[in-house]
């Protein structure tokens, strides 16, 4: 029996302890935000935090996360109000969006250790996160923006002000 | 309004006319202009796209598949503009595959050119019906009414009504003829030309299950499918009993597949292939994947089991020395020119590798076959064709096949092939349960429809005045007889055809046991590199400035277009070359030693693009692209400026990644398996700045998914030559010892 906490919620798992955390999150507890990209730790799409540190969920056996606190993209904020998410939206970062959960998790980890990162810091921290669409320039700009927003939040509450307008969305067809 | 049957094929063919380069997958015979005349489309019904709730919220249906190009916004933006509603009041839903939406073809940078008119017409027709409803209610004439922000106004009587109040009456009004409905004056556009963030961005940022791979269906099982590693191979037997005994495994069985056609069919529309292999179905994907590691299969690999890339390269060398099998285009007399002794002759050969798509979201598809009906959840770029194919495979009427479209984690042409639909549907039918088939990254890299490789043997001549006077190219590619493999051909009418008086392009093909297909800017993504690199070689041989040499070429009076031939508009191309040169300070900036600028242009997918790259190369041949300037002309309007910039910047980074990629064959199998062997650029390797400039010209808006990509490869290689004196003629660049720093 493996016990772990995901986004503040307790979970137990009786299955294969070698199952990567990625598939536990996606298929056992239905948190689909963490993405499968390569299964070899090459692309970073599956990045989550284990006890606050970034980890590749595709290479982390669920047993290695026993008794740990795991944070996934769903746990960053319930409504997209975290400064990193706000910055990402404001600078219109995602294209296909598949790698972005991993990008955001890496960015959050970077900013918690380096609140004011340089371009070089960002490159080092984010180099493990591949983006096939080539959003790197906006990712880099958004990390800087998130750093500014976080600093501003310390003195006053953040006001998410999207530069580009955003319509509401609903989905059909898919997840009935 | 009645629906007429869509002649999809005719429509798709029409879209290729005047396209420049080739539209994705519509390219069957090199040099064939595919069709002519205005697009034929079944009449669209506004109600299929527009729903207005009593509270005024407008729900618009996005007909095309989202794969990162923001088409989920783009097409509804066109409707919303003409409907005259505020974007904040718009909701968007994804369409299922359905012919009532017209062609849901997501490829070939065609969403904008195919939908620019019809989607605006749908919106305008909706507005017309809302005005009719208001005029009818108020007893006034429609021409006295106006609209703004989702309301109809009658100024004379100072009355107004929201669309929400008018919606149910509007639905009973006659539907106007879409072709004659009045469209807005572009100066009144409020949405077209304004950046809008994808309606799914918030879902992406908070991890909502919106991608194909995220689908959950009650009672769903998970599948892996070990396809034959050699094209056309067959699974003869496997240790199925041992596999079935493993934990979590519910089913394991051999898929016979279908004998493969051996004439390189158009995999997009004719047959994506239904290959033999072994399916393992389990209660979790991890269980299925783990079981596969214990799978032992006896294969019959058939005729391609010994194929080898090194052998193909050797053979191409031999073929290049023989006379070509086919002459694709011939103007003037190149051989006569090459005999002159007052000219300078340059001969070069270029090697184009196969490359894979490697979309970030691995291929997947969920299917549920039940009681003779099939439901599919897919990320297909050509879903209507997929539905036809899967219905045929399972012997179902198309009306019993429902295809839901999900967001795709990147497409780049890979999701235009509906092979996963066939596999998933077959597996679901066999096991009698809903099944989610997910490919591993290794499956994805090793079972692609690859960008086709080839070998180009060029010979060109410049005269004493520095003018290009002869151009000869022998393309040694892949195919059967004299026909090219799918999307593996060569367009002999590509620039500089018509602009050089003595011009000849010939081809020879050799057999290939690998599926090939459309990859972002198919054919252009490698052709532009070869042609624009060789033009650069000739410019240097002539002692001319590379920008001026190109402008002079384009200023030449071209040979007339042949019937049905599409050609570039030289004035539009010169416009973007001059813009790129101006913005980059071409020829005006002092650069340190080892740093240089390179230029290239290309016309494809109806778009005109010129790019300048500033590149630094160190003594270890490490390349850093300092900055890229992109200048593009895709017509009169940039529908969504933020997305447009993103597409162009992404295309540049994608093109740079391609410079590092190669797929090779050994013993009939693809050697590379994952991103470590088929890399893409990482953040630190990407140019820190990519400036994108659009030249707005009085031409219909065209697409942007592809045409910004082709020029970046030659622009960077041309800069490397100027910086180092070494010309890159073989991709990937690592073959010549270069790499991105």
Image: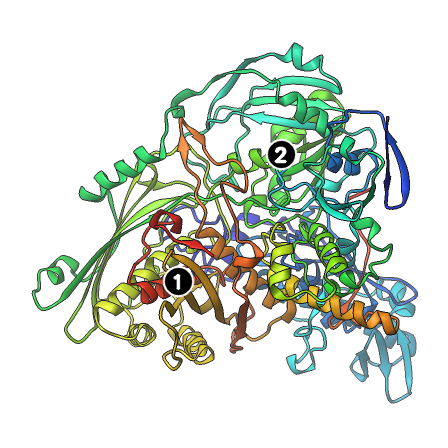
| Quarter the N terminus of chain B occupies | bottom right
Distance Cα–Cα, label 1 vs label 2: 39 Å
Using the image as rendered, state which of residue B519 and residue A124 is in the foreground: A124
Q: Indicate the position of residue A5 as horizontal and vertical percent values.
A: 87, 40
List the single residue furthest toward the top. B241
Percent x, y of residue B278: 60, 21
Query: Closer to us: mark 1 or mark 2?
Result: 1
Position of B192 with respect to B548 (left or right) is right
* Residue found 39% across the figure and 40% down from its top: B485
Q: Pick whichever, B505 or B36, lies toward us.
A: B505
Q: Residue at horizontal 72%, vertical 61%? A: A114
Q: Secondary structure at mark 1?
A: strand
Dot 2 surroundings within 10 Å: few (below 14), some, or many (20 or more)? many
Q: Chain of mark 2?
A: B
Residue at x 52% of width, y 74% of height: B699
Residue B327 in view (yes/no): yes
Q: Nearer the viewer, residue B57 or B595?
A: B595
Q: B508 or A112: which is nearer to us?
A: A112
- Sequence order check: which comes first, mark 1 or mark 2? 2
Q: Position of residue B521 (x, y in %)?
A: 48, 55
Q: Is residue B109 visible?
A: no
Residue tagged 1: B617
Q: Which residue is mark 2?
A: B439
């Amino acid at each position: 029996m493996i016990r772990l906490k995901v986004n503040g919620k307790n979970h137990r798992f009786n299955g294969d302890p070698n199952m990567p955390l990625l598939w536990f999150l996606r298929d056992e507890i239905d948190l689909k935000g963490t993405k499968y990209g390569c299964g070899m730790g090459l692309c970073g799409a599956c990045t989550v935090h284990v006890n606050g540190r970034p980890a590749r969920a595709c290479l982390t056996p669920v047993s290695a996360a026993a008794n740990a606190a795991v944070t996934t993209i769903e746990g960053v904020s319930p409504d997209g109000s975290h400064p990193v998410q706000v910055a990402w939206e404001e600078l219109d970062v995602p294209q296909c969006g598949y790698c972005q959960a991993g990008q955001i998790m890496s960015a959050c980890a970077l900013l918690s250790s380096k609140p004011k990162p340089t371009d070089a810091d960002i490159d080092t921290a984010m180099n493990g996160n591949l983006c096939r669409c080539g959003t790197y320039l906006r990712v880099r700009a958004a990390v800087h923006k998130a750093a500014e927003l976080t600093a501003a939040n310390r003195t006053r509450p953040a006001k998410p002000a999207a530069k580009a307008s955003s319509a509401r969305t609903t989905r059909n067809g898919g997840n009935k | 309004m009645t629906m007429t049957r869509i002649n999809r094929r005719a429509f798709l063919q029409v879209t290729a006319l005047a396209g420049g380069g080739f539209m994705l997958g519509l390219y069957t015979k090199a040099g064939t202009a595919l069709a002519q005349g205005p697009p034929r489309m079944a009449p669209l019904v506004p109600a299929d796209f527009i729903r207005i709730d009593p509270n005024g919220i407008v729900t618009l249906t996005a007909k095309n598949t989202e794969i990162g190009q923001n088409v989920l916004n783009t097409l509804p933006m066109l409707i919303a503009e003409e409907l005259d509603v505020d974007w904040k009041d718009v909701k968007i839903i994804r369409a299922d595959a359905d012919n009532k939406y017209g062609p849901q073809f997501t490829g070939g940078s065609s969403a904008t050119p195919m939908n620019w008119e019809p989607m605006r017409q749908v919106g305008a027709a909706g507005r017309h019906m809302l005005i009719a409803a208001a005029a009818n209610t108020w007893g006034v004439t429609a021409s006295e009414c106006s609209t703004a922000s989702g309301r109809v106004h009658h100024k004379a009587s100072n009355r107004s009504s929201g669309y929400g109040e008018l919606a149910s009456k509007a639905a009973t009004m006659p539907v106007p003829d879409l072709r004659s409905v009045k469209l807005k004056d572009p100066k009144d556009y409020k949405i077209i030309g304004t950046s809008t963030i994808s309606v799914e961005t918030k879902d992406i940022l908070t991890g909502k299950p919106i991608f194909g791979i995220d689908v959950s269906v009650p009672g769903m099982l998970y599948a892996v499918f070990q396809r034959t590693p050699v094209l056309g191979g067959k699974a003869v037997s496997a240790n199925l009993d041992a596999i079935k005994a493993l934990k979590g495994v519910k089913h394991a069985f051999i898929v016979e597949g279908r004998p493969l056609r051996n004439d390189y069919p158009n995999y997009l529309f004719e047959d994506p292939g239904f290959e033999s292999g072994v399916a393992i179905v389990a209660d979790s994907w991890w269980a299925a994947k783990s079981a596969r590691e214990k799978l032992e299969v006896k294969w019959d690999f058939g005729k391609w089991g010994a194929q080898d890339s090194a052998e193909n390269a050797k053979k191409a060398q031999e073929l290049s020395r023989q006379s070509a099998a086919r002459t694709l285009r011939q103007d003037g007399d190149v051989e006569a020119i090459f005999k002159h002794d007052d000219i300078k002759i340059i001969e070069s050969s270029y090697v184009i590798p196969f490359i894979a798509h490697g979309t970030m979201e691995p291929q997947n598809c969920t299917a549920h076959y039940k009681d003779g009906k099939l439901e599919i959840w897919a990320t297909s770029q050509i879903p209507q064709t997929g539905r036809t194919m899967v219905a045929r495979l399972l012997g179902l009427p198309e009306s019993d096949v429902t295809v839901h479209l999900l967001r795709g984690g990147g497409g780049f042409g890979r999701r235009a092939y509906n092979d996963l639909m066939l596999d998933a549907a077959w597996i679901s039918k066999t096991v009698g349960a809903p099944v989610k088939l997910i490919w591993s990254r290794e499956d994805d890299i090793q079972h692609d429809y690859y960008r086709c490789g080839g070998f180009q043997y060029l010979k060109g001549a410049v005269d004493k005045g520095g003018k290009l006077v002869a151009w000869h190219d022998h393309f040694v590619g892949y195919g059967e007889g004299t026909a090219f493999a799918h999307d593996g051909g060569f367009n002999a009418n590509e620039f500089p055809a018509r602009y050089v008086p003595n011009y000849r392009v010939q081809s020879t093909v050799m057999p290939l046991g690998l599926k090939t297909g459309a990859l972002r800017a198919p054919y252009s993504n490698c052709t532009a590199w070869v042609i624009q690199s060789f033009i650069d070689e000739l410019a240097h041989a002539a002692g001319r400035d590379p920008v001026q040499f190109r402008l002079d070429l384009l200023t030449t009076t071209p040979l007339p277009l042949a019937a049905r031939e599409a050609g570039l508009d030289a004035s539009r191309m010169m416009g973007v070359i001059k813009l790129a040169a101006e913005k980059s300070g071409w020829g005006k900036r002092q650069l340190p030693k080892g740093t240089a600028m390179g230029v290239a242009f290309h016309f494809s997918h109806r778009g005109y693009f010129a790019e300048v790259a500033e590149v630094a190369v160190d003594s270890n041949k490490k390349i850093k692209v300092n900055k890229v300037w992109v200048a593009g002309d895709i017509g009169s309007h940039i529908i969504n400026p933020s997305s447009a910039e993103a597409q162009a910047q992404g295309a540049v980074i994608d093109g740079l990644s391609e410079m590092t990629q190669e797929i090779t064959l050994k013993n009939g199998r693809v050697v590379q398996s994952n991103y470590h062997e088929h890399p893409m650029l990482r953040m630190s390797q990407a140019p820190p700045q990519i400036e994108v400039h659009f030249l707005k010209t009085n031409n219909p808006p065209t697409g942007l998914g592809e045409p910004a990509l082709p020029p970046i490869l030659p622009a960077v290689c041309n800069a490397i030559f100027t910086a180092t004196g070494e010309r890159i003629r073989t991709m990937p660049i690592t073959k010549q010892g270069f790499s991105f720093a």
